[in-house]
Every structure is written in structure tokens, then in C-alpha cells.
Image (spheres, rainbow, N blue to C red):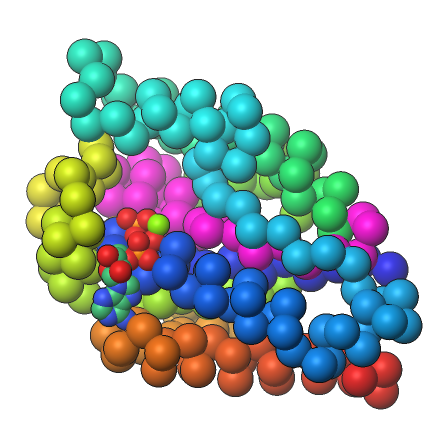
Amino acid sequence: MTGKLIVLEGVEGAGKTTQLKQLHQWLEDLPQVQHLRHLGEMADIVITREPGGTNLGQALRTLLLDGSASHQVNDRAELLMYAADRAQHVDEVMRPVLARGGWVLCDRFVDSTVAYQGYGRGLDLSLIERLNRIATNGLTSDLTLWLRLDAEVGLDRSQKRGPLDRMETADAQFHQRVQQGFEALADAHPRRIAVVDAAQPVDQVAQQIQALVLDRLTLWYGHRL
Ligand SMILES: Nc1ncnc2c1ncn2[C@@H]1O[C@H](COP(=O)(O)OP(=O)(O)OP(=O)(O)O)[C@@H](O)[C@H]1O
Ligand SMILES: [Mg+2]
């Protein structure tokens, strides 16, 4: 029995963290999940994030995102720090959960690196793909939910939430390129990446996500439900 990896992606302020919590709660209460657990077909559901899903990752996250830090992070250093975070996270958190039949709900994964460091910073896309493979050791998501929202609207939400981090304070053109990156990824991987209209109110976004996850549950567990 191996579990499932569901990833939430999208620009700053798209609602990833909000929706991840809602999805977790909804899954825990879902009769189908309780039934699968009763059958021994499904273990625990773990929420995690990148960067910052491990102790090492948390230290890297602070170095990467602290907007007030005195250090500079150049583009290649940034790429490698995200990769280091991911390599640790995959082995320490994700693989063990999946191996025992659990589900991992992850806030950002490889697509964010393609969008931010590839499209945003302009680093070589094939190099990023290879680096992602090294970092994940081949682990791919079973379903990626792309919360599609105009970058400006997302930044506006982030601004209202509180102080902006180092990524959030990057210029508007950077965030537009990141958005184009997510669009290109969704076009290239229509089966893995499902598009969610994140401009709607929180509850309606949650309903879209629930419908998509229900579809996959049927696909994955079929006759055992
Ligand atoms: N559908 C929505 N409509 C309006 N506001 C929202 C919606 N979803 C989330 N928000 C609000 O927008 C802000 C950003 O949401 P959230 O932190 O979930 O986004 P995020 O994608 O995790 O952002 P980040 O990339 O910065 O981690 C929060 O203040 C949240 O309450
Ligand atoms: Mg978040």
C-alpha cells in the first residue's frame, strides 16, 4: 500500500495555506476516508510545506524568505537552497508517510521551482528539471491543484495579511513571469495539474477542490470505497 501526494501550488496569496487546512479537515471527516482506514487501505494525512517541512528546511526557509536579513541570496544559491530543502523533505517527511499508506498534503513542490526560479528568475528550465529530479529522487505528485489567481490580486491579499517576505517584495514583472510559468506547467501537464479558480470566495474554492479530490479518490480506490 502506498499513499498519495497532493500538492497545492500558486502565486503568493492565492490561498494555498488556507485551502490546505480546509482540505485536511474535510478529508478527516469524509466517510470514504474513514472507510478506507477501516479497511487498512489508508493511513494518516499529513500537512507539510516547502520550504520548511523539516528542521533543516525551516532554517533554509528563514534564510530564503526573511526580507529584513542582511545577507543577499543570488539566483543560483536560491535555486540550490530550495533543492536542499526538498531533498531533505522528501526523505524525512514525504516518503515515510507515503510508504505507510498515508497522504501528504503539501504547500508548494517542484512546480514552484519551475515557476519562480525558472520563469521568474530566468534560470535554465532543463537544469531545473534535472535538479528537481535529484531533489525528489523521482517522487512526483498524484494530484497538483493549481490555485489560479492574478498575481496582483494575490499580492494584495498578502499585503493585507501582514509584512511581506523576500519573494513577495520582488517586482510585479517577476510575479507576472511566475504566473506565466504556472500557466505553461498546467498546459503541459493537464492530467497531473488541475486548475482551480482561486478568485472565488474561500468556501467556493474549497468546494472546487473537494470535487476534484473526490474524483481522484474514486479513480484511486474505486471498488474499495
Ligand atoms: N478565496 C479567498 N478570497 C479572499 N481572500 C482569501 C481567499 N483565500 C485566502 N484569502 C486570504 O488571503 C490571504 C492569503 O491567503 P493564504 O495565506 O492562504 O495564501 P497562500 O497562497 O498560502 O500565500 P503565500 O504564498 O504567501 O503562502 C490570507 O489573509 C487569507 O485569509
Ligand atoms: Mg501560504
Residue at horizontal 39 percent and vertical 55 percent from the top: 17
Q: Quadrant of the N terminus?
A: bottom right
Number of on-image labels: 0
Q: Looking at the picture, does residue 105 appear above or below residue 76?
A: below
Q: Which of these two is toward me, 80 or 3?
A: 3
Please tell me in which quadrant of the rendered image residue 10 appears: bottom left
Residue at horizontal 81 percent and vertical 49 percent from the top: 99
Q: Quadrant of the C terminus?
A: bottom right
Q: Which of these two is toward me, 35 or 223?
A: 35
Residue at horizontal 80 percent and vertical 64 percent from the top: 42
Q: Looking at the picture, does residue 72 appear above or below residue 219?
A: above
| x, y percent for residue 193 | 49, 68
Q: Is 145 included in the stretch rendered in magenta?
A: no
Identity of the residue furthest to the top in this view: 70
Q: Which of these two is toward me, 178 or 206?
A: 206
Q: Which of these two is toward me, 136 or 209?
A: 209
Q: Looking at the picture, does residue 164 appear above or below residue 6?
A: above
Horizontal relation, residue 6 to residue 201: left or right: right
Residue 58 in view (yes/no): yes
Residue 220 in view (yes/no): no
* Chain part drawn in magenta: 99-125
Please tell me in which quadrant of the rendered image residue 73 appears: top left
Identity of the residue furthest to the right in this view: 39
Which quarter is ligand 1 in? bottom left
Q: Looking at the picture, does residue 133 appear above or below residue 66?
A: below
